[in-house]
């Protein structure tokens, strides 16, 4: 008669997890290990890792037919995360370990040939999925214990060696428990805004962008401070709330970016892909199941596209869906995955190909200048709320002993107050920032007085703005009002929002 066993693990698809039941069967037949349930190449190789690991902890591997089935059978199984549960399934079927602690437990981890348990990617979303599925305990690699410990409501234990797991199941030893949580320090993680001299209009636009999560485009000659400003934007954004921090940390867990000692990301991420980046690098891709791209790594943070006019049109147009929907769906050979991608887009570009320090030194014709930034399509630019044309600062501003620039902490306080006002206003609907509010809500339920809407209606009649652009102007106007402590925008705030949509390069 065959001996059967059953343990559980978790499969990750996108940022979602599904519990996988692993059944082990030791029965009559020639010595061999058969693995079924849509395993990928890495998982197929686990047969050799598991066999060597079990032998190297002093346990005789079954010298008969071993069948391991991972279900649901139609779900693709990817990676080495199943090594530990496969080994335990074999040992349980061979009656080498008791099953007392296995009910309600999920096992995760890769095995070295000597039995060491190696860290794997995606442990945080896997443990979150286990909790949602009703499991009470998760055993993870010791190197992933910090991120797994972020999940509250279930017991998390860490193992450094397969022998430790075997001893724990036998009741002869204890596994490691998570230590105290150490989060990122907000002020130490980003440079200070006071380092940027002059550029008051650009700084105010950046403040508006941070307060309402509005996308922004900056143009100006090289070396004027576009990159400096963009890199300081995460500093004036409020720290991520607990739920947002877990979302961001789960995405970075999938790509293996989490720090073992500080697994919880509380500072909004800053992602700056190179202008030669492909579509797959931006939105995600790869064979089998798609991996996260830059738009997902920048979730709840900033995606900075420097020299955006030099990027390929296909890469730029791929941003339109995540900009509008806040998520990206990627179809590949093994299925469709969905990643969150609600980011704040910052684009920067020179005004023309020759990029002189002064406009008077430009050698480009008017046609060349228009064609250069004309690579950015109208539909993409229509999704950008704020345009800023930056000018070189004066010599006196650069060499002044005390520039009087506001530090990041002061600006962040105003941004936080504005965000709190917006969150309180939209709390009943579940929106956090003004940029998330549908235009129909602003036009009907929160319609502004006719006097305040006069500038906007004039721009619509003359074709200077589209209907989508009008909705975005209303969102910016509400943000400007929040920064000023007003209950609702007036004509001045709507005019200010329209001025932010002046491209400045025509």
Image (cartoon, rainbow, N blue to C red):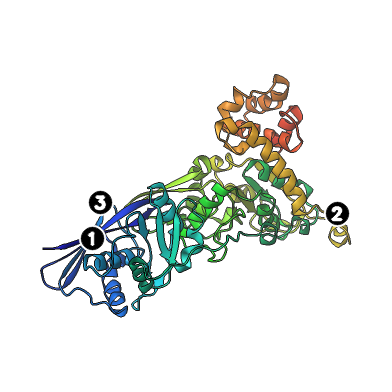
Q: Is residue 504 visible?
A: no
For label 3, the residue is 74
Tell which of 225 and 483 is nearer to you: 483
Q: Position of residue 249 (x, y in %)?
A: 52, 55
- Is label 1 in a helix, a strand or a loop? strand
In this view, 28 is above or below 19: below
Q: Position of residue 182 (x, y in %)?
A: 60, 61
In terms of sequence position, does the residue under pointer 3 or pointer 1 come before the other?
1
In 3D space, how far apart are the residues under numbered discs 1 and 2 (Cα atoms)?
Answer: 70 Å
Q: Depth-wise, is mark 3 or mark 1 nearer the camera?
A: 1
Tell which of 359 and 97 is nearer to you: 97
Q: Quadrant of the N terminus?
A: bottom left
In this view, 63 is above or below 220: below
Q: Quadrant of the C terminus?
A: top right
Query: What crowding class fits label 1: few (fewer than 14 Cα within 10 Å), some (14-19), or many (20 or more)?
Result: some
- Is label 3 in a helix, a strand or a loop? loop
Tell which of 26 and 427 is nearer to you: 26
For label 2, the residue is 404
In 3D space, how far apart are the residues under numbered discs 3 and 2 (Cα atoms)?
Answer: 63 Å
Occupied quadrant, residue 155: bottom left
- Is label 2 in a helix, a strand or a loop? loop
Dot 3 and dot 1 residues touching (CB under 8 Å): no
In this view, 263 is above or below 502: below
Tell which of 10 and 467 is nearer to you: 10
Q: Position of residue 248 (x, y in %)?
A: 53, 53
- In the visual, does 104 lie left or right of 405? left
Residue 5: which numbered mark, if any? 1
In terms of sequence position, does the residue under pointer 3 or pointer 2 come before the other?
3
């Amino acid at each position: 008669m065959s001996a059967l066993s059953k343990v559980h693990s978790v499969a990750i698809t996108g940022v979602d997890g599904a519990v996988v039941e692993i059944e082990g069967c030791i029965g009559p037949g020639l010595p061999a290990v058969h693995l079924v349930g849509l395993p990928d190449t890495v998982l197929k190789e686990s047969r050799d890792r598991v066999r060597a690991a079990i032998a190297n902890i002093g346990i005789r591997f079954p010298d008969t037919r071993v069948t391991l089935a991972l279900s649901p059978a139609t779900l693709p199984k990817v990676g080495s995360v199943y090594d530990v549960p496969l080994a335990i399934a074999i040992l349980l079927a061979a009656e080498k370990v008791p099953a007392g602690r296995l009910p309600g437990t999920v096992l995760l981890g890769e095995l070295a040939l000597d039995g060491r348990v190696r860290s794997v990617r995606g442990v945080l979303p896997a443990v979150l999925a286990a909790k949602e599925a009703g499991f009470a305990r998760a055993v993870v690699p010791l190197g992933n214990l910090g991120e797994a410990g972020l999940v509250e409501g279930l017991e998390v234990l860490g193992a450094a060696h397969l022998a430790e797991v075997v001893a724990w199941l036998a009741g002869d030893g204890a596994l490691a428990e998570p230590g105290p949580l150490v989060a990122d320090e907000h002020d130490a993680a980003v440079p200070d805004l006071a380092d940027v001299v002059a550029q008051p209009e650009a700084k105010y636009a950046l403040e508006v962008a941070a307060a309402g999560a509005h996308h922004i485009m900056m143009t100006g000659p090289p070396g004027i401070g576009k990159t400096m400003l963009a890199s300081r934007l995460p500093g004036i954004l409020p720290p991520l709330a607990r739920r947002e921090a877990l979302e961001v940390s789960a995405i970075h867990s999938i790509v293996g970016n989490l720090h073992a000692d500080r697994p919880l990301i509380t500072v909004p991420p800053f992602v700056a892909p190179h202008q030669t980046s492909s579509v797959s690098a931006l939105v995600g891709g790869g064979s089998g199941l798609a991996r996260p791209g830059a738009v997902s790594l920048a979730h709840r943070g900033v995606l900075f596209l420097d020299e955006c006019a030099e990027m390929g049109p296909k890469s730029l147009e791929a941003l339109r869906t995540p900009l509008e929907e806040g998520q990206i769906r990627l179809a590949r050979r093994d299925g469709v995955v969905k990643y969150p991608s609600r980011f704040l887009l910052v684009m920067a570009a020179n005004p023309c190909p020759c990029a002189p320090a002064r406009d008077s030194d430009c050698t480009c014709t008017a046609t060349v200048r228009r064609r250069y930034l004309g690579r950015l399509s109208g539909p993409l630019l229509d999704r950008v709320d704020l345009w800023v044309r930056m000018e070189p600062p004066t010599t006196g501003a650069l060499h002044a002993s005390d520039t009087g620039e506001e530090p990041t902490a002061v600006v962040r306080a105003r941004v936080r107050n504005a965000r709190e006002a917006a969150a309180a206003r939209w709390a009943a609907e579940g929106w956090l920032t003004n940029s998330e509010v549908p235009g129909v809500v602003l036009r009907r339920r929160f319609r502004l007085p006719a006097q305040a809407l006069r500038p906007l209606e004039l721009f619509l009649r003359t074709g200077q703005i589209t209907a989508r652009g009008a909705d975005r102007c209303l969102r910016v106007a509400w943000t400007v009002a929040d920064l000023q402590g007003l209950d609702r925008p007036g004509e001045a705030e709507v005019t200010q929002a329209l001025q932010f949509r002046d491209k400045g390069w025509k």
